[in-house]
Amino acid sequence: MPLPSPRRDRIELTGLRVHGRHGVLPQEKIDGHDFGLDIALELSTAPAASRDDLRRTVSYADVAHLAAGIVGGESLDLIETLAEHIAAAVLEAHPLVRAVEVAVHKPSAPIGLPFADVAVRIRREAAPVDAVIALGSNLGDRLAHLERALALLGQAEGVEIAWRGTVVETDPVGGVEQDDFANTVAGLRTTRGPWELLELARAIEADAQRVRTLRWGPRTLDVDVIAWGDLIQDDEELTLPHPRAHERAFVLAPWAAVRPDDVLPARGRVADLLRAAPDRAGVRPWGLS
């Protein structure tokens, strides 16, 4: 099946002017210059646009003030170094940004000849992020559904399966009368943003002909984004970390079986969470039911 590709839209901030004291000459570090900045942020803007919600994107005002603070701060010799500092700060402060372009202009550089401008322009990619997904099925060939989903994940652009949890069989939770589930988890290294990973998860569910009719009801396949790096966000479509993962043994047991010391952001060590999970008695190794 065709899988959705990562989306890279651009938010462009151009012509920002900030005074700074950067240059190799002593006088430049005393009097300084006016520097110009152009900054382009690459990320998927579709989630923000769909709900008109700033929390799903990056505030260009925040980026402008961050960059201005760097230009107006510590004196550096080279605008090459200044551009690197800005790019690194933007990627660190705004994990939804998957790549950034920074141009630093120095139109009053002491060249001694007529010229219009001198600039350094760089582009830097965000590092891949460690993410965790959970998969479950209780209709049809449950194990085949899980294996098909993992195979599709491994084929997706910008996704590498770093590790796989064990497969467990679990009693259903949520109060709906239905068959037992097969569950597992997987760790990913991904260059996709969290919303792009959610889009991929839904496409893989659709491949399994998942039908959403009854909450917590039977399904051929359930694919949930459990964690994306250390990102913490509260959103009705994608809360991170997953709002119930810390109390779900069907997520924690297959994870703790292979990586007990992993930490679920803002919640704690996976093995410790499993010991406190209220549904842990309903989880057993695959094939032992």
Image (cartoon, rainbow, N blue to C red):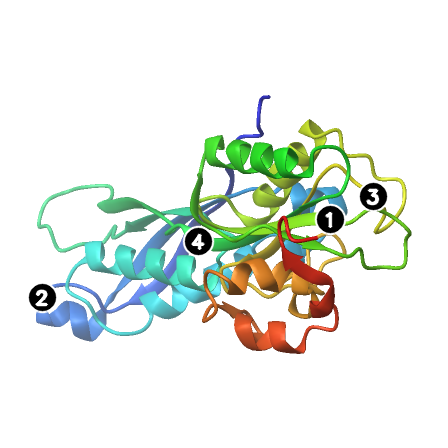
Q: Earlier in the sequence, mark 3 or mark 4?
A: 4
Residue that carries the numbered disc 1 in the rendered image: 181
Mark 3 Cα shell of 10 Å, populated few (<14), some (14-19), many (≥20): many
Mark 1 Cα shell of 10 Å, populated few (<14), some (14-19), many (≥20): many
Cα distance between the residues tagged 2 and 3: 71 Å
State left or right for residue 78 relative to residue 15. Answer: left
Q: Earlier in the sequence, mark 1 or mark 4?
A: 4
Q: Earlier in the sequence, mark 2 or mark 4?
A: 2
Q: Secondary structure at mark 4?
A: strand
Is residue 13 depicted above or below 280 in this figure?
Answer: above
Residue that carries the numbered disc 3 in the rendered image: 218
- Residue type, numbered disc 4: Val
Q: Nearer the viewer, mark 3 or mark 4?
A: 3
Cα distance between the residues tagged 1 and 4: 29 Å
- Residue 283 at x, y percent in the picture: 68, 61
Query: Residue at the location (28% across, 45% down)?
Result: 122
Relative to the observer, which residue lies in front, 225 or 219? 219
Q: Quadrant of the N terminus?
A: top right
Q: Secondary structure at mark 2?
A: loop
Is residue 44 depicted above or below 29 in this figure?
Answer: above
Are the residues at dot 2 and dot 4 in contact (C-beta closer than 8 Å)? no
Cα distance between the residues tagged 2 and 4: 41 Å
Query: Residue at the location (33% across, 70% down)?
Result: 72
- Residue type, numbered disc 2: Leu
Residue that carries the numbered disc 4 in the rendered image: 129
Q: Nearer the viewer, mark 1 or mark 4?
A: 1
- Residue 34 at x, y percent in the picture: 31, 60
- Residue type, numbered disc 3: Pro
